[in-house]
Image: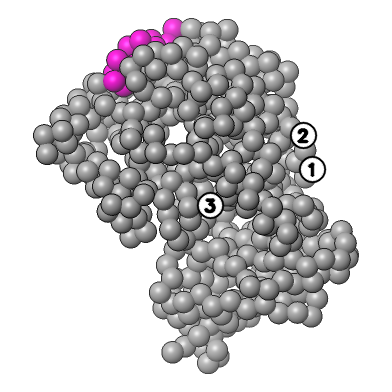
Amino acid sequence: MVRCLLVLIISSALSAFAAESFAPDFRIKPDDYTVLMAVDAKLPPGLKPFQAGAHGKFHVMGWTQPEQQLEWKITVPQEDAYAVNVLLRQHGNQPLVVEVLGAGQTLSAVVPETTRGWQRVSYGGTLRLPAGQQRFLLQAHARDKTNRFNGSVFSVELVRPRVREQLHAAALNLRADTRWLQACRYGLMCHWTSETFPQRGERETYAQAVHDFDVEGFARQVQETGAGFVVFTTSHAQHFFPAPLASLDRLLPGRTAQRDLVGDLADALGRCGVKLFLYYHLGATSDPAWLKATGFWETDTSRLFDNWTAMISEAGQRYGDKLAGWWFDDGAVNYYYRSAPWERLGMAAKAGHPGRLVAFNPWELPSPTEFQDYLCGEGNADPSAGGLLAVGGDGHFKSGSHQDLQACATLITEGDWVHSQKNTDIGQPRWSAQQMAVLLKDFIARKNVPIFNLEIYQEGAVSPASVAMFKHARERLASQ
């Protein structure tokens, strides 16, 4: 059988992104993971970044020729041994022999031809890297000298083994029990943002819309769907927070509200037996004032994550166990490429309630960190998650890049995430009640918890048609 050889060495870095993007310094962090993104390498002809642009850094694709080489240059603060992971995906039918080379040493790992999807390939040994700059190279070719391979590369991770074990233990220590989430069976998500339109007429200002939001009406609709929890959006395309938040006001005044909508929602939903999660987005290019205020583009990420932890911990301390979870977006394509201080972020996210569930959305890419409790599962409508979850299992992944995390799936119910069209009604749900009942039965059998995004009007109402669909689906489930 044909085998392919992937060789990895560390070398000089040219960003594939526009001038206004995050530029890493390629300095190895001795006390944490260091991420080297493939898109930050010097890319050869034919290797192209997937969805390059804005702040998201994805993978590179088109890796098919032995002449293609990726190069970085890193700086090691002091000599030490480093373990290595490579995050990649193979598209062909041949096993891949993945090698990492540095400072005259080589590590090798085989990715079987049966492996599908994104993988975090770990090595059994270490590379001892001397202090100073180190050149590495990434290349691939088939062992019989043909070009019969096809791969995509996301990143390389470097970490000292002792640090890896310490971080692994710390992550497991922060994990919370997810059995209550499984008991909820399914939840809802609502992208209620500064861009949300009312059913008719002009948008109100964000602060006025917070003031006028019909909490009790919203809670009644949620209760009727039978959902056990709601993920409610705070910041999205523009950075706002629907409550007083002193740490945000210090950064960028005018982005909060006098009414504590989060607290009101937690109370109203709680009276209906429904728990509250919050969705949070770190920042988008459509909000340049926020990016400037928070230090978004700075190579030194200290200010950015100081701001983040201040806001997230302030909210967590205020709401305590009324805030059941966080759904952080763009974990793999926003936080990850900054070599985020995951332990610190995880602790801030659980401030005020150690049992709070936390997830950093990886989209379809590998999980960016162990410092989380569940997989967001954006777009994954397959209850088995590609065969990784068995009927009668405990709802946690046993293998793959999301190993040990509670399974969830986040799906669009109608036409979009946000109701952003003026003077339009929310469209019909994608599923009939019968179809939804079958889908929910399959999810529940695997303890995989789906989250269904419902469009929502600015006044705080969701579509009656979608509510009725969930109500009738729940009734069908109960009768089976």
Return the residue at label 1.
300
Q: Looking at the picture, which amino acid does disc 2 mark?
A: Arg
By secondary structure, the bulk of the magenta-drawn segment is best described as helix
Asked if the residue under mark 2 is in contact with the one under mark 1, i.e. CB atoms within 8 Å, the reply is yes
Q: Pointer 3: residues within 10 angstroms few (<14), some, or many (20+)?
A: many
Q: Choose between 146 and 244: the one closer to the eye.
A: 244
Return the residue at label 3.
367
Q: Secondary structure at mark 2?
A: helix
Q: Earlier in the sequence, mark 1 or mark 3?
A: 1
Q: Choose between 208 and 247: the one closer to the eye.
A: 247
| Color style of the picture | one colour
Rendered view: 84 above or below 383:
below
Q: Which residues are magenta?
A: 212-223
Residue 103 in the figure: left or right of residue 4: right
Rendered location of residue 141, percent (x, y): 57, 83
Whether residue 379 can be seen here: no
Q: Which of labels 1 and 3 is toward the front? A: 3
Q: Residue at x 55, y 72 (%)?
A: 63
Q: Looking at the picture, which amino acid does disc 3 mark?
A: Ser
Q: Earlier in the sequence, mark 2 or mark 3?
A: 2
Rendered view: 420 above or below 32:
above
Q: CA distance from mark 1 to mark 2?
A: 7 Å
Q: Residue at x 79, y 43 (%)?
A: 300
State the mark number for residue 303: 2
Q: Secondary structure at mark 1?
A: loop
Q: Looking at the picture, which amino acid does disc 1 mark?
A: Asp
